Amino acid sequence: MTEATKAGLEGIVAGKTSISTVGKEGLDLTYRGYSIHDLAKKATFEEVIFLLLHGELPTLTQLNEFIDQLMSWRSLPPELQTVLKLIPKDCNPMDVLRTGCSMLGTLEPEKSSSLQLTIAKRLLAIMPSMLLFWYQYHMGKGSIETSSESEKTIAAHILHLLYGHPASPSQIRALDVALILHAEHEFNASTFTCRVITSTLSDFYSAITGGICALRGPLHGGADEAAMEQIIQFKSADEAEVGIKSMLTKKEKIMGFGHRVYKYGDPRSDIIKEWAKKLSDEPSKKNLFAIAERIEEVMFREKHLYPNVDFYSALTYHFLGIPTFLFTPLFVISRTSGWCAHIFEQRANNRLIRPIAEYVGPLPKPFIPIEERN
Ligand code: CMC
């Protein structure tokens, strides 16, 4: 296999970006030049969205205006509410965001690319509403009000809609940090999908819908849900040790471990692990945390593989009382900020993304008319 045809395009530079640095020697993961460690410690998700969309951190006035705008765009058009009610209760909630995003594109179409920033903000504001409206409707709560401005931030809004009451400051901050960590990650599969769609001059909603489709798979965003299913199957750390070793012997993949770019650890993992630890404040949670840590130890000992962002994010979400099947949709809500920034960047200097393939099929052969074939 030649360099250019490496499976999965591993290590291939597929374009330029000024949005984030991932796995560059001597450099931390950065968004627009800011270290993920600083952002996770000192910024809010709204500041990070602003940074990704505008290229600079906001001033306090800009941030407040931005938050006010996002709050004012949370409401669901009645037609979208009707569609959300029709989406089956037992579907994968990624279908809700995929369909919701696509439907919004029919109601509020991108008539001109000058609307792209407005659409980006509308999508970031409305996605939590779509997801939680659908969820609560099928939980028998009727048509919940999603446009409430009682919560300023996206993290607080999500948890309030989920719990039916305000969340505590530490719960809000834990989700806020998870959203910051998932916001952007260079040319990952879903972002690259958005850029490919954008490069054809398709519309904003199509690009985001494509991103949602790519993120759904368990090798990408779906890993957090798969990781949680793996963690909760064990009753103790010792049981996890035996179970994980046995899965490795059978060549099964352990979800939430390994990464295409990070071969010596994902910088986001330790940050979210701290939050999972902080939230493990009761015996059953402490036990789950111990199980997760043992899985981490076994994976390092046996395979030299490190947890990626999804492993301890799964535990953090679980400790926040978030149902497992909503984990990947939360990833969508966060990553939409990165996707939007990449769509802007692609559009600003667009050329159709159209690589070529190495042909490995049969040599040319004569066509045999159907009546002569046996
Ligand atoms: N469990 C067990 N073995 C693994 C794992 C794992 N999670 N990840 C990699 N390996 C092994 C793999 O079996 C292979 O071994 P061998 O060479 O003996 O066949 C070797 O490591 C290389 O693996 P690969 O699948 O070729 O590596 P890749 O760069 O193509 O894949 C990955 C990267 C993330 C898809 C992979 O590590 C994986 O499937 N991990 C589990 C799913 C997961 O956690 N995905 C989330 C990724 S990070 C966040 C995101 O993008 O959403």
Image (spheres, rainbow, N blue to C red):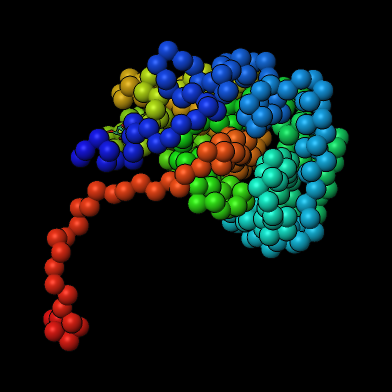
Which one is nearer the viewer's eye here, 324 or 272? Answer: 272
Question: 139 or 115: nearer the eye?
Answer: 115
Left-right relation of 169 to 98 = right
Where's the N terminus, which quadrant?
top left
Rendering coords of residue 71 (x, y %): 81, 38
Q: Residue at x 63, y 26 (%)?
A: 55
Residue farthest toward the top in the current orientation of the protein = 26
As drawn, is 8 to the left or to the right of 45? left
Residue at 46% in and 15% down: 27
* Residue at the (79%, 31%) spot, across then down: 67
The part of the image, by quadrant, that contains residue 152 is top right
Compared with 323, 310 (above or below) is: above
Q: Which residue lies at the image location 69% right of the left edge and 45% below the top edge?
A: 114
Image coordinates for residue 194, horizontal then vertical, percent:
52, 45
Q: Quadrant of residue 59?
A: top right
Asked whether 60 or 162 is in front, the reply is 60
Q: Nearer the viewer, residue 74 or 158?
A: 74
Q: Compared to 209, does 239 lie above or below?
A: above
Whether residue 10 is visible here, answered yes or no, is yes
Ligand 1, image quadrant it occupies = top left
